[in-house]
Image: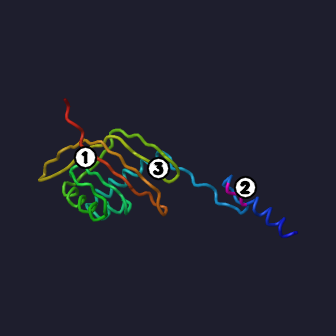
């Protein structure tokens, strides 16, 4: 009889843990969501990777399953090799990005979005050209590192 009572209490405790999300053991405190400033700091890190001129360093900031819809290519990039290929060519122009305006949405402790307008100074043959574009970066925290899982960039439409 005693074992039935123990199993009944154990079952009730397990059910309570499932319903409330609590357990009888000491649980780690919940992770805290990043601040908007934390998310905003991810762009300068990406821009610094561009400044190295190393396409692999830039690609390291993207998740293995990331999707890149780049500004100056009509090809959707869905593999690391595709992303490296894009940045090899893009980095030839020595890009330097500046955010003009941004809207940051923190979705939860592991994901955030930064969208807005940025401007790139591109240098080719000693001449500098400026390109304005709309952008969206979707970030996920994976294995303790913020990675880009989706990056869309499109040149600003001309004035009508």
Placement of 135 over or under 23, stated as above or below: above
In primary-sequence order, the first of circles 1 and 3 is: 3
Residue visible at 32% across and 39% down in the picture: 100
Q: Which of the two residues, 54 or 84, is positioned nearer the viewer here? A: 84
User: Where is residue 152 drawn, in percent x and y?
Assistant: 31, 48
Q: Which of the two residues, 113 or 130, is positioned nearer the viewer here? A: 113
Specify whether 114 is left or right of 98. Answer: right
User: Where is residue 50 drawn, in percent x and y?
Assistant: 29, 56
Residue visible at 71% across and 63% down in the picture: 25
- Dot 3 surroundings within 10 Å: few (below 14), some, or many (20 or more)? few
- Whole-angstrom CA distance, mark 1 to mark 2, is 54 Å
Residue position marked by numbered label 3 in the rendering: 38
- Dot 2 surroundings within 10 Å: few (below 14), some, or many (20 or more)? some
- Secondary structure mainly formed by the magenta segment: helix
Tell me the quadrant of the picture where the N terminus can be found.
bottom right
Placement of 2 over or under 89, stated as above or below: below
Residue position marked by numbered label 2 in the rendering: 16
Q: How many marks?
A: 3
Residue position marked by numbered label 1 in the rendering: 120
Query: What stretch of residues is rendered in magenta?
Result: 14-18
- Whole-angstrom CA distance, mark 1 to mark 3, is 22 Å
């Amino acid at each position: 009889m005693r074992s039935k009572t123990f199993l009944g209490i154990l079952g009730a405790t397990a059910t309570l843990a499932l319903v409330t999300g609590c357990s009888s053991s000491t649980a780690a405190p919940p992770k805290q969501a990043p601040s908007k400033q934390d998310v905003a700091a991810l762009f300068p890190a990406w821009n610094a990777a561009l400044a190295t001129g190393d396409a692999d360093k830039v690609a390291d900031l993207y998740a293995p399953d990331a999707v890149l819809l780049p500004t100056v290519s009509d090809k959707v990039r869905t593999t690391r090799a595709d992303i490296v290929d894009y940045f090899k060519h893009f980095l030839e122009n020595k890009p330097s990005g500046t955010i003009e305006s941004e809207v940051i949405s923190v979705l939860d402790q592991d994901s955030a979005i930064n969208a807005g307008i940025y401007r790139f100074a591109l240098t080719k043959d000693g001449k500098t050209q400026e390109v304005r574009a709309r952008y969206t970066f979707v970030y996920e925290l994976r294995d303790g590192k913020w990675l880009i899982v989706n990056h869309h960039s499109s040149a600003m439409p001309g004035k009508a």
